[in-house]
Structures are given as C-alpha cells and as structure tokens.
Image (cartoon, rainbow, N blue to C red):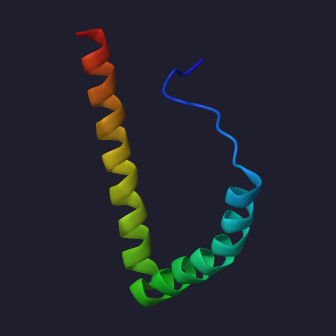
Amino acid sequence: MDRRLERITLTLQGRKAYERLVPTMLDVETDLIKKLGQANSEALEKGLAALEDIFIDQAKIKKAG
C-alpha cells in the first residue's frame, strides 16, 4: 500500500460545504479550459503530468537514500 495516501472523512458540515463548492469549481474549471483553448489546455495537462512524474521520482530517490 502507498503510504503517502491517507483516508479522510468529512464532517456533515464539511460534506455540505463540499457539495456547495463542487459545482462552482467545476464551472470555473470548464471556463478556464475554454479560455485556454484545446492546444494550451493539452499543453498544460502534459506539463502538469511531467511535474508529477518529477515529484514522484524525487520522492523515490529520497526514500531510497
């Protein structure tokens, strides 16, 4: 099991806040992607994936060292 992952639960109040915020944040995300355009959106996704790979590699090196 990956020890970087933690299971958490929300309180009832937290769950209600989450349910209120998610639709708004999805709308914001959709708007940003539209404004970026397809090519820039794909480039952003590719760049973020590359950064994630770098961080994962660094964590592995740190853990091994």
Q: Nearer the viewer, residue 27 or 9?
A: 9
Q: Residue at x 72, y 50 (%)?
A: 11
| Picture quarter with the N terminus | top right
Q: Nearer the viewer, residue 3 or 17?
A: 17
- Residue 37 to residue 56: above or below: below
Residue 14 percent coordinates (x, y): 67, 57
Q: Nearer the viewer, residue 38 or 48?
A: 48
Residue 55, quarter of picture: top left
- Residue 21 to residue 4: above or below: below
- Residue 22 to residue 7: above or below: below
Looking at the image, residue 13 sits to the left or right of residue 58; the answer is right
Residue 64 percent coordinates (x, y): 29, 10
The residue lying furthest to the top in this view is: 65
Q: Residue at x 43, y 74 (%)?
A: 41
Q: How many marks?
A: 0
Q: Nearer the viewer, residue 41 or 59?
A: 59
| Picture quarter with the C terminus | top left
Residue 61, quarter of picture: top left
Residue 47 percent coordinates (x, y): 33, 58
Residue 36 percent coordinates (x, y): 40, 84
Q: Residue at x 61, y 75 (%)?
A: 26
The residue lying furthest to the left in this view is: 65
Residue 46, quarter of picture: bottom left
